[in-house]
Amino acid sequence: MNVPLVDLHIQYESIAEEIAVATREVMERGDFILGRAVGAFEEEFADFCDVKHVVGVATGTDALHLGMLACGIGPGDEVITAANSFIASASAISFTGATPVFADINPDTYNIDPGSVEKAITSHTKAVMPVHLYGQPADMDAIVKLARRHNLRIIEDASQAHGAEWNGKRVGSFGDVTAFSFYPGKNLGAYGDGGAAATNNPEIAEKLKMLRNYGQSKKYHHDFLAFNSRLDTLQAAILRVKLRRMNAWNEQRRQAALIYNRILTSLDISPPSVAKDAQSVYHLYVIRSPQRDALVERLNERGVGAGVHYPISIPQQKAYASLRYKLGDFPHAEKACSEVLSLPMFPEITEKQIEYVCDTLADILIAGNFVIGVSNRPEQRIAA
Ligand SMILES: Cc1ncc(COP(=O)(O)O)c(C=O)c1O
């Protein structure tokens, strides 16, 4: 059996007819740039996130970048974010001219640790950027509280968490701005690049609309220099079709996670921890092992598409060498980066496929005397 990390084809087949109709409509109308589907999608996605405004942009990275610019973040400012995200969380901060400052993570949830954020606050801190990693919301109660106390903006990076909830509230409704990515493999993925910024603030929404469209207030009137970063109309039409199924697809991911949890627990392997106030949308299903690289290799050899998200913490990336962070500055994030592995996860994954993944994992562990588990708890050794 072959179980890919993500299977986009099976999902496409289930919606192919509707995609054909939606994309044909755009081509027949010819409104390829900021066409009708963009506005319609923005309204529908705002409803989905329970926010007032959504502005479609070209990528998730741009949603973060332009979102921070719309909040007035720039040179001389510091923005605190998690040390273990995809590089774009931090690079978007750098693109505004501000400096990314990193915080360590909670080793159970892999999300930013509010205590570590608090320690990183200086007189230059303008914002905190929680990343809802792997589909699980960060601790938004603590983050909202500390942001209020220190008068900081909140920029949520929800690129991996469309529809996730903290205390019954959807991500996107906590921050001044929230960024979503529609990269094809995301829970809500386009058939190319796409992104959106969500906000409850009408001024930020207006600024975002200008920032994505050359700083135009009306055609050929440019109030400031800005970008060409518009959500493509064809992608918006595709996203509208997929959005109708988002809640159901997220529920299918949660059901798949329950099956994984049950089987892995029976094998003495720790499933991912979800905070009691969080409802995860399982963008990724992540376990850990100190012998991660060898384990991933063996899984891949046996047809299980395991992956690593992400192998190097952002402060340890060459691109950020100039910030002079040292190994050991973010011990929980660094350990996670060396141990985490993602097992196949997508809404259509079957129970049989999950059983195959878990059986294969158990076989490899037994044959190889691998250690697997959560490093901050006693590890479970599956002996040969
Ligand atoms: C956490 C996180 N932030 C930002 C991004 C950037 O999104 P995009 O690739 O759409 O620019 C991604 C995904 O790629 C992501 O996973």
Image (tube, rainbow, N blue to C red):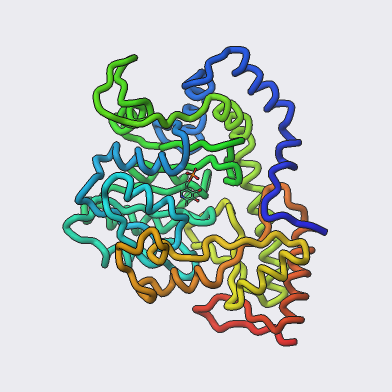
Would you say 115 lies left or right of 13 here? left
Residue 247: % across, % down: 60, 41
- The residue positioned 61% from the left and 60% from the top of the image is 285
Residue 244: % across, % down: 61, 33
In the rendered picture of this protein, how many numbered marks are placed on residues? 0
- The residue positioned 31% from the left and 21% from the top of the image is 216
Quadrant the C terminus occupies = bottom right
- Give above or below for 122 relative to 214: below
Q: Give the image quarter of residue 70.
A: top left
Would you say 230 lies left or right of 307 here? left
- The residue positioned 38% from the left and 71% from the top of the image is 330
Residue farthest to the right, as pictured: 1
Residue farthest to the top, as pictured: 29
Residue 76: % across, % down: 19, 51
Residue 372: % across, % down: 62, 77
- Give above or below for 288 relative to 253: below
Quadrant the N terminus occupies = bottom right
Would you say 173 lies left or right of 234 here? left
- The residue positioned 47% from the left and 45% from the top of the image is 170
Residue farthest to the left, as pictured: 123
